[in-house]
Amino acid sequence: MGNKRLLILLLGLILFIALMGLTLNQRERLSWPEKFLKDTISWTQGIFYKPAGYIAGFFQDLRQLRTIFEENKVLKMTLIQYARDTTKLNDLELQNKRLKEALGFTEQQKMANNYKFRIAEVVAASPDRLNNTITINLGEKDGIRANMAVMSIEGLVGRVMQTSSFYSTVQLLSSMDDTVSDNKAISVTVKGKENEAFGMMETFEKNTGLLTVSKIEQKEHFEVGDVVITSGLGQVFPTGIEIGKVVSKDVGDFGITYKASIQPFASFTHLREVFVIEVPETR
């Protein structure tokens, strides 16, 4: 038995050395055992590689999404800052001229344009064409109150109509109708002509997509191409928020006043993010 075991061991050693010699040489063609072994290992690796690749790709996509999210967050904050600076600049020169030397320049007046932009995501939109509203993910817990102005990057889109703890309903400008009893008109003026132009925006023409400013007196300077902004006189919408551009001016009812058609800057459909304008309360 000892000799047989020794013989088997020697034969195994010889076969092992021969196999090493075959596999260590640089050969273009593999033997059939090597082919079988390679194909088997490759097939097995393929079974595990694809799911592992999918999983790795999934986590890589998550990292990329996280990076994109952070970049979008920075861009949104930059846009907020830009919108705030632009809105303040609209009224800065005229306000300084009117109030800098005024004796009654109180702390409340100093805070008049000190408002913040709160970004909110649109989580729902009403399909009712007669009551165009959206729902945003900010509510009373976030300090949102009824009648706060809401805008997009392009311009004014509406006002907060109702609030709950964590969500708010925003009534869009496309819902404005002067035939409705609870319709809220917006006091507007013309950018650069704040002391020379005044009107009331109270209607949205659904067939044309234009807003209508009425009660424009003959002396008021509303001209085609002028940029219409909020005047702040209604105490709901802050001063200087851009709304749209005058595209036409016609004689109003009874021929006493004029009315102007305004092409809004903001789109009222497919809104993704909006800004709620928070005006500090003054006492």
Image: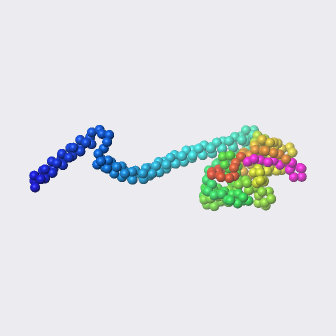
Nearest the viewer among 32 and 112 is 32
Q: Is residue 152 left or right of residue 197?
A: left
Q: Give the colour scheme shown.
A: rainbow
Q: Is residue 199 left or right of residue 144?
A: right
Q: Position of residue 48 (x, y in %)?
A: 39, 52
- Would residue 46 be seen by someone viewing this image from the given angle? yes
Kindly indicate the quadrant of the structure image that contains residue 182. bottom right
Q: Position of residue 62 (x, y in %)?
A: 49, 50
Q: Position of residue 7 (x, y in %)?
A: 13, 50
- Would residue 107 be seen by someone viewing this image from the given angle? no
Q: In this view, does 12 lie to the left or right of 262?
A: left
Residue range (magenta): 251-264
Q: Where is residue 25 in the image (x, y as percent from the top left)?
A: 27, 39
Q: In which quarter of the image is the N terminus?
A: bottom left
Residue at the image point whose x is 39% and y is 51% from the top: 46
The stretch drawn in magenta includes residue 252? yes
Residue at the image point whose x is 15% and y is 50% from the top: 9
The stretch drawn in magenta includes residue 78? no
Residue at the image point whose x is 65% and y is 50% from the top: 275
Residue at the image point whose x is 80% and y is 57% from the top: 178
Number of disc labels: 0
Nearest the viewer among 104 and 135 is 135
